[in-house]
Image (cartoon, rainbow, N blue to C red):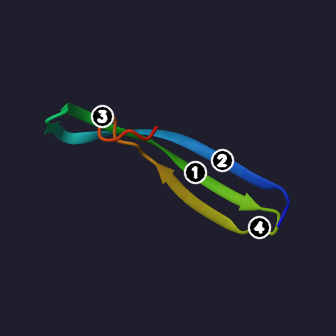
Amino acid sequence: MSGTIRLQYRRYRLPFHAPVRTAHGVWMQREGLLVRREDERGAVGYGEAAPLPDFGTET
């Protein structure tokens, strides 16, 4: 399948109600991306990317 795909994304930053303490430090907020994908037929899909800093080797 080949065709045009439209991608849109929006960054977000949401504060926690209270600080989250872990062995890696204190977190005050959560950051990530919301992604919307639409193909030439109008099929739409949504996704999220919200990596946790210092919790893995993936980037």
Q: 56 or 42: which is nearer to us? A: 56
Residues at badges 2 and 4 in contact (C-beta under 8 Å)? no
Query: Which is closer to the viewer, label 1 or label 3?
Result: 3
Q: Which residue lies at the image location 24% right of the left edge and 41% below the top edge?
A: 16
Earlier along the polypeptide chain: callout 2 or callout 4? 2
Q: Which residue is mark 1?
A: 35
Q: Which residue is mark 2?
A: 8
Residues at badges 1 and 3 in contact (C-beta under 8 Å)? no
Earlier along the polypeptide chain: callout 1 or callout 3? 1
- Return the x and y of residue 3 as percentages of the image width and height: 85, 60
Earlier along the polypeptide chain: callout 1 or callout 2? 2
The disc labelled 4 sits on which kind of residue? Gly
The disc labelled 3 sits on which kind of residue? Asp
How far apart, in angstroms, are the residues tagged by discs 1 and 3? Answer: 23 Å
In the structure shown, which secondary structural element does the residue marked by tag 1 occupy? strand
Q: Which residue lies at the image location 76% right of the left edge and 62% below the top edge?
A: 39
CA neighbours of label 2 inside 10 A, class few (<14), some (14 to 19), many (20+): few
In the structure shown, which secondary structural element does the residue marked by tag 2 occupy? strand
Q: Which residue is mark 3?
A: 54
- Return the x and y of residue 7 as percentages of the image width and height: 69, 49
- Return the x and y of residue 51 as percentages of the image width and height: 40, 43
Earlier along the polypeptide chain: callout 3 or callout 4? 4
Q: Which residue is mark 4?
A: 42
CA neighbours of label 4 inside 10 A, class few (<14), some (14 to 19), many (20+): few
The disc labelled 1 sits on which kind of residue? Val
CA neighbours of label 1 inside 10 A, class few (<14), some (14 to 19), many (20+): some
The disc labelled 2 sits on which kind of residue? Gln
